[in-house]
Image: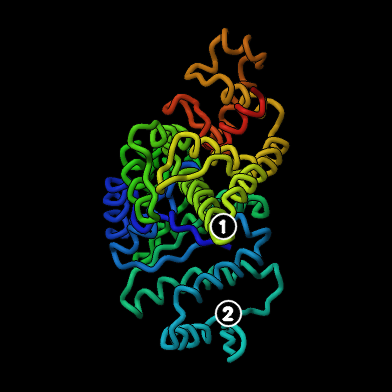
Amino acid sequence: MVSNPFVPRYLIGRQAELEQVSTILAQDGDLMVAGIPGNGRRALICWAAQQVGARVLEIDCLRATNSSRFLELLAEGLLQVFSDPAELELIQRWSTEHPLILEQYLTRRTRLVWHVPSKDNWIILQALLTLPQVMAEWLDCRVVLVFQNFPHIRSWDRTRKWEDYLRQEVERQNRVSYVLIATVPEPWVYESNLHVVTLAPLERKDLQSWIIDAMAAEGLKFEADSQALNMFLNYVQGHLGDAIALARRIWLDCRAFATMKDEGTKKNAPGIISSQLQSSSIVYPFEDGLIQTHHVHRSTLSLVEDLSLTFESLLLLLPPIQARVLESLALDPTDSPHSREYIEKHQLSRGGGLQGALAGLEQKGLVYGSKYSYRIAMPLLGFWLKHRLG
């Protein structure tokens, strides 16, 4: 598998948010970072934690299918954050006062285990959530406990007992900061003490500066007299995840052409290059490391083709009205999807059905709300939909 040299080694265009989050963490604050997936939410938290010298423990609640699995992920995360022998010795001392056992083996990874009936998992949760605070006090450090997809625990926490307890812990511990990652803040967040930081799409100038430097590091540059750079920025629309994916695809296509060119040269058969190009997805050769408009467009087409099965599956999982609205916005972007003309043109339902579909798509991170003119939040998905339907 080829590594990705375009994963940023610094925070792109989030300096104001970085200062804000760092200040909150330094003051033992708790917060929610909201925004669409792929827009740098986790990176922002990690950089802010690094600035204040905090250790980061991440739990993806989407992976927790029940209470037992949630506890396993929490225990694993704790041992990843506190893994030094001296720290494990402290955890061993702490575990003697709780119904947990620290198992250490030479040939297997260290584990925190417990032997209680599943109905007593509640006791284990209470114990495990005290450990970050205890370790922070013993080691004189700060801990940031990050919950991704936090609302997903409701799939098994039907009475919201665990959710309510976790919310209480947010305000109780003075050396542990809780950070929730979400797409859209829920109403209860504004009634709590959580600070809310919402990430907008990246500014065009910030992405432009990054992609020029990142391509230059790989010996590539956008042709000065072409619209290649503008096309790249237009296709990714401020979405960092899509920008990274497209940059990598352009780079791989360039490498593939260079490899075929070298093989043709070694065999003293230049015709081999053209025949290979005709049978490959790389139609246009790269010369002198220059990225031209046709390179950007062709690489985008091949990338969304590879993603087509994922996009198809996503559409099939959506309620029909949401899929219909998504397709309409891809074909005909608008900042007024509620207008009578737009509804009639695309045969959408009036009233609550349309509003519910838009709200559902926003919750899923597929469409921005009114603040960003209801545009599709995943540019490559929008590109694929437009070409598929058009």
Instruction: Please give left or right for residue 289 compared with residue 275 in the image.
Output: left
Looking at the rendered image, the quarter that the N terminus falls into is bottom right
- The image position of residue 321, as x and y in percent, is 68, 25
- The image position of residue 183, as x and y in percent, is 50, 42
Res 198 seen here: yes
Which of the pair 10/126 is nearer the observer? 10
Q: Earlier in the sequence, mark 1 or mark 2?
A: 2
Find numbered disc 1 in the image and state the secondary structure of the residue it sits on.
loop
Location of residue 39 with respect to 121 vertically, above or below: above
- The image position of residue 288, as x and y in percent, is 40, 48
Q: Which numbered dot is residue 268?
A: 1
Instruction: Please give left or right for residue 75 compared with residue 311 in the image.
Output: left
Q: Which numbered dot is residue 166?
A: none
At 61% across and 85% down in the image, what residue appears?
108
Residue type, label 1:
Asn
- The image position of residue 350, as x and y in percent, is 63, 14
